[in-house]
Image (cartoon, rainbow, N blue to C red):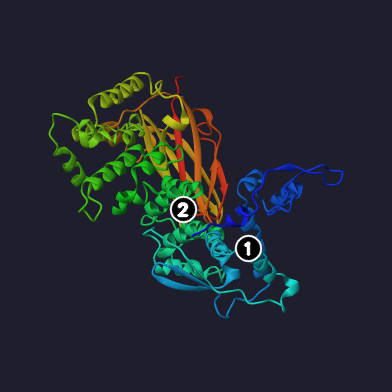
Amino acid sequence: MSSLSLITKQHRAQLERRIAGSTNRWRFPKQPFSGDLLSLSQKCKALSIDFEEALRNPDRLCISQIQKLFCGNLKNKDIQSGEADVILECLGFKWELHQPQLFQSQTLAKLYLEALTQGSTSPLKELEKLLQAQSPKKTKERSPVKKMIISLKINDPLVTKVPFATALKSLYMSEVEIHLDDVLGVLASAHILQFDGLFQRCMDMMMAGLTPITIRKFYEAGCKYKEEQLTTACEKWLEMNLVPLLGTQVHLRRIPQDLLHKVLKSPRLFTFSEFRLLKTILFWVFLQLNHKIMTIPTHETMLTFFKSFPKNRCFLDRDIGQSLRPLFLSLRLHNITKGKDLEELQDLNFFPESWLNRVTANHYHALENGGDMAYLKDLNTQAVRFGLLFNQEYTTYSKMIAVYGFFFEIKGLKHDAASYSFYMQRIKHTDLESPSMVYKHKPVSLRAVRLVKYEIRARTLVDGKWQEFRTDEVLQKFELAKPSCKSRILKIQTVGSPIYATFAFIFPPS
């Protein structure tokens, strides 16, 4: 098939110097630019086209001009109901279209103009007829434009009859109903048709329709079309939902490893505790290796599976585990402090012994120095983190946490329909509900003052956009008596629910 460049081939000429009045401009002697480079420059600016690109590729300027003309006229017209003047052959079907509508698609516009000029001895005259037919001054004098047949080959398996028909229907109607099950096919169709308005509408639907079932396909679509806004939306959604939502569903196996790795490295990742995050990633590994499992396994089932490997090497040192090391290096194993959880890690035979020895050594030095975490410096990448998932029906919600013999309550309060506050406070070990059980299973620090560097963050989704709230990084001495036992309060106003509140802290040397 001949190219639209036929229009310019007949008028190819070298640049020459001509005098144009007092301006002495550079000029082309012939079409398609009417000779005047200054005029061309102004035209490109009006159409948002790069001037140098227009010099190299005049076809694009021509198509952009015609698209602007047709799309402008469409605003003042009813939907075409007469006989079709364009037949599109695609996917084994013949689709009847109308000339003005198809110019919303850059792909169809190029195909149409190529067909219009093919075999013509005067392609410029054919193009002139096309433009004159759209002139508002000659509405009554219009001569019929000849019916054209154009063909489009599509090899994308996502583009099937139904989503492609939806895409073509969108040339005629601005609010065509798109089902979430079809949105990937419509997106692919819009991409092939170069139909920008429809493509963005599909993107918006996908960003608003993220679920455990759709997250993988939508993320892969974002990567395929290099749409950063979609991949970023997937990352932000997973940062909040990996542990509380996907951590309890078999859909966890759908998460691609590269996306999981990005989220694990994010300082915004929400988790109830470091051990809960570790369990979630272990479940993910289990599901990758057991494809026939259709339900989330029990914790005991998962432990039994990993313990079944020979004891001569840990799981991550085996060939099967080498590629997974970056995921587990992104975890903060040093923040798993409960004795029971640490014993479980030792028995699991999952991690290299050197990793676990380093964790144990860090805990030993911290306890020996009154809880000081000398090995932790950066709050964003190393802090101990605990989370509260505050649902709309709550009026108050709190959790007790213990680290190196110090006890804190992390708490959220709802004041009215859209007003909340979050804070943490130090608790005396004698004020706990079952102090005798604490003495038996946990260390208890008698230090009257504990220096803490902390930050409190909260995120929630409102109308498809994440709202974020945070305190500054605060360095504070926590004592046992009020008011010095209480942290700075994070106060927020939002209608979003649930609210993901994260308490991140370090015990610096004091």
Find residue 122 and name its label. 1
Could you tell me which residue is drawn at 52 percent across and 62 percent down? 111
Find residue 498 and name its label. 2
Which of the 4 quarters of the picture holds residue 124?
bottom right
Kind of residue at badge 2: Pro
| Helix, strand or loop under label 2 | loop
Left or right of residue 154, residue 144 in this image: right
Counting from the top left corner in percent of width and height, residue 421 is at 53, 45
Say above or below: 488 vs 189: above
> Between marks 1 and 2, how big is the CA–CA gap?
66 Å
Q: Residue furthest right?
A: 22
Residue 272 visible in the displayed image:
no
Q: Between 174 and 210, which is closer to the camera in this rendering?
A: 174
Number of on-image labels? 2
Could you tell me which residue is drawn at 55 percent across and 43 percent down? 469
Q: Between 416 and 27, which is closer to the camera in this rendering?
A: 27
Q: Between 311 and 73, which is closer to the camera in this rendering?
A: 73
Which of the 4 quarters of the picture holds residue 307?
top left
